[in-house]
Amino acid sequence: MPDALPPLNALKAFEAAARHGGFASAAQELGVSPAAVSQLVQKLERHLGKTLFTRFNNRILLTDAGKAIFAGVTPALNEIAETVRRVSRGNARRKVVLSALPSVAECWLAPALSRFLVAHPKIRVDLRVEDDPAEASSEADLRITYGRAPDPERVQAELIRDSVFPLCAPGFMNSHQGRRAFTAALGPHLIHTSWGASYGSNPTWHDWYHAFAPHEKIDMAVGHQVNASRLALQLARDGVGMALAHRWLAADDLAAGRLIVASEKTLPLGQSYFIGWPPSRARQTDVMLLKDWLLLNVQPPTTGQSPRP
């Protein structure tokens, strides 16, 4: 049986070349020369007695035989790599590597994860807080992103489509009764959240006023500015002003009375949050258990209600 297997280096060179669509990029990934990649691919072709690529100058295209081999080689190599990683850890208990955006990790995931670990005490988790795009997320068993991650090899499931609405501390509302009608006078007390140049679908106070108070002229240059949703919630909790906050991320604060709803008029986020994982992790019980639990418990339990097992 082992005699029927082609050389592993030849398989790795073929897989990298097929994935990148060229020998040069594959060579850069593997740390060898493009000529070496070409030679390894030719060695595999001789072993199989099949032509795997059609070559056009510097371009390569998979043949029908190449497509069939590529479909089987990629998951096999991933499985081998995962087995090596698992064995190299020796007797150490494996941790599920969970990567998430900072605001999601702080406002929702940490409390939710605590409930999961109480229900499943034998599982260990390595929680990593990373902005998008997360280079290190390639090592993660599970990754939570805003919007679908641009990775065709990663399996992804929609976690939640959140919305935003005005929230503030009870003390702030008591001190600003005259501004409850959301007139322009509230402008200096608004907390604005900007996610940065990479994002353009998060609703702003300008969008909210345009939808629900179009006759009010809001000066977006006044008020407070933060670059993360969790910071907007913190300022609102401290009574600094009124935030256009995520209903999902603010759920615990609302349940505890630290924040109150100033208006039920909401705007949906431009995209949903997704949870993704490499296909090879689908065989790992602990990873799939955590993934399924997070999908089932995406909304925190109400008072007196236990999280789902």
Image (cartoon, rainbow, N blue to C red):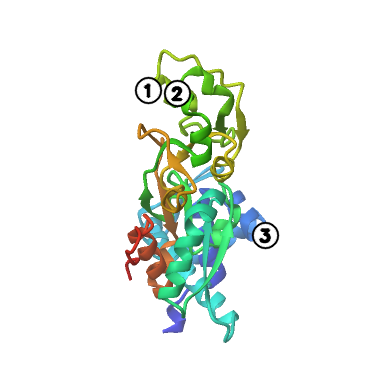
Q: Residue 64, located in which quarter of the rendered image? A: bottom left
Residue at image position (44%, 27%) is 180
Residue 243 visible in the picture:
no
Viewer-nearest of discs 3 and 2: 2
User: Callout 1: 10 Å neighbours few (<14), some, many (20+)?
Assistant: few
Q: Mark 3 near mark 1, Cβ–Cβ under 8 Å?
A: no
Mark pair 3, 2: CA separation: 60 Å
Locate residue 224: give its quadrant. top right
Toward which corner of the image does residue 188 lie, by quadrant? Answer: top right
Between discs 3 and 1, the one toward the N terminus:
3
Q: Position of residue 3 (x, y in %)?
A: 46, 82
Q: Quadrant of the C terminus?
A: bottom left
| Side of 65 relative to 7 (left or right) | left
The secondary structure type at the circle numbered 3 is loop
Q: Nearer the viewer, mark 1 or mark 2?
A: 2
Residue shown at the point (60%, 80%) measured from the top left: 88
Tell me the crowding category of disc 2: few under 14, some 14 to 19, or many 20 or more residues within 10 angstroms, Cα based.
some
Comparing 81 with 66, the one in front is 81
Q: Which mark is residue 212?
A: 1
Image spot of residue 76 (x, y percent): 44, 69
- Dot 2 corresponds to which residue? 182
Mark number for residue 31?
Answer: 3
